[in-house]
Image: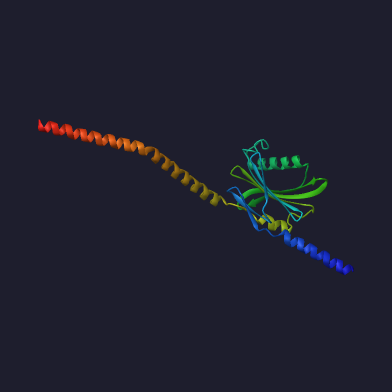
């Protein structure tokens, strides 16, 4: 009986670990990044911040994108990356009444980022929350997991999830900027050409009229 119970328990644990690592849905975070999630998230918008959240098998997956100098301007008082991260963490802990238990600097596709973990209660239940955050082009990108279990920051299933956080490289962002600038320039030129057409037509008509009048005057002078 005990052996049977152990086998059943082990099967349940293995099943939960397997489902924990299945991330099939790709959520765009603006035009700067994507995050792989286990299913389609619910979207909430507030104060210039887009929040994507899903409760999958008792684990909460969350992602966020917001303009640092827009909806988040009241949270941060300085413009340096370190100050933005410090302000973000302090604001997160203050709003959740949470307690920080680790914080480290990280690199996300060449960009300076930060990872941190904190614990906070929801409806009296303790939760452990692990987040990766990147400040990119004045936009704050974040993804994280909230669990009822305390995990090592190097736990394999956390690593698999955070590996699904794909941020564009500096080269890709530069190419996007150049492409966007080219599109804007092309549209501007098209608008200018469109606005100039009536002027060009009017100028051409005046030129033709003057030329005809000049020929008539010239013909008259010759005949005289």
Residue 156 visible at all: no
User: Is 224 on the left or on the right of 201, as rendered?
Assistant: left
Which quadrant, please, contains the N terminus? bottom right
Nearer the observer, 220 or 101: 220
Residue 161: quarter of image: bottom right
**Residue drawn at x 28%, y 36% as measured from the top left:** 205
The image quadrant of residue 45 is top right
Give the image location of residue 217, x and y in percent: 17, 31
Task: Confirm whether residue 217 shows in the render.
Answer: yes
Name the residue: 20% across, 33% down: 214
Q: Nearer the viewer, residue 20 or 157?
A: 20
Quarter where residue 88 is shown: top right
Residue 178 percent location from the top left of the image? 49, 47
Residue 209: x, y in percent?
Answer: 25, 34
> Which residue appears farthest toward the right when viewing the image?
1
Q: Residue at x 21, y 35 (%)?
A: 212
**Which residue is at the front of the view, 171 or 38?**
38
| Mark count | 0
Q: How are the residues colored? A: rainbow
Does 169 sit left or right of 90 as displayed? left
Question: With 61 as the anchor, is 213 left or right in this view?
Answer: left
- Location of the C terminus by quadrant is top left
Towards the viewer: 173 or 44: 44
């Amino acid at each position: 009986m005990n052996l049977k119970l152990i086998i059943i328990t082990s099967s349940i644990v293995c099943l939960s670990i397997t489902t924990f690592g299945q991330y099939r849905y790709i959520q765009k975070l603006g035009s700067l990044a994507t995050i792989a999630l286990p299913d389609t998230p619910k979207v909430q918008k507030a104060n210039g911040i887009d929040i994507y959240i899903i409760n999958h098998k008792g684990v909460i997956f969350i992602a966020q994108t917001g303009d640092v100098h827009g909806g988040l301007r009241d949270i941060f008082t300085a413009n340096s990356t370190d100050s933005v991260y410090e302000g973000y963490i302090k604001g997160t802990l203050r709003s959740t009444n949470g307690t920080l238990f680790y914080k480290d600097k990280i690199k996300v596709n060449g960009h300076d980022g930060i990872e941190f973990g904190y614990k906070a209660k929801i409806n009296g239940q303790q939760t452990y929350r692990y987040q990766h955050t990147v400040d990119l082009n004045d936009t704050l990108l974040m993804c994280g997991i909230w669990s009822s279990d305390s995990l090592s920051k190097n736990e394999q299933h956390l690593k698999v999830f955070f590996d699904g956080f794909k941020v564009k490289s500096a080269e890709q962002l530069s190419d996007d900027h150049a492409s966007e600038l080219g599109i804007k320039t092309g549209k501007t030129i098209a608008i200018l050409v469109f606005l100039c057409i009536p002027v060009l037509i009017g100028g051409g008509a005046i030129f033709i009229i003057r030329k005809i009048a000049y020929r008539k005057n010239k013909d008259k002078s010759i005949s005289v």
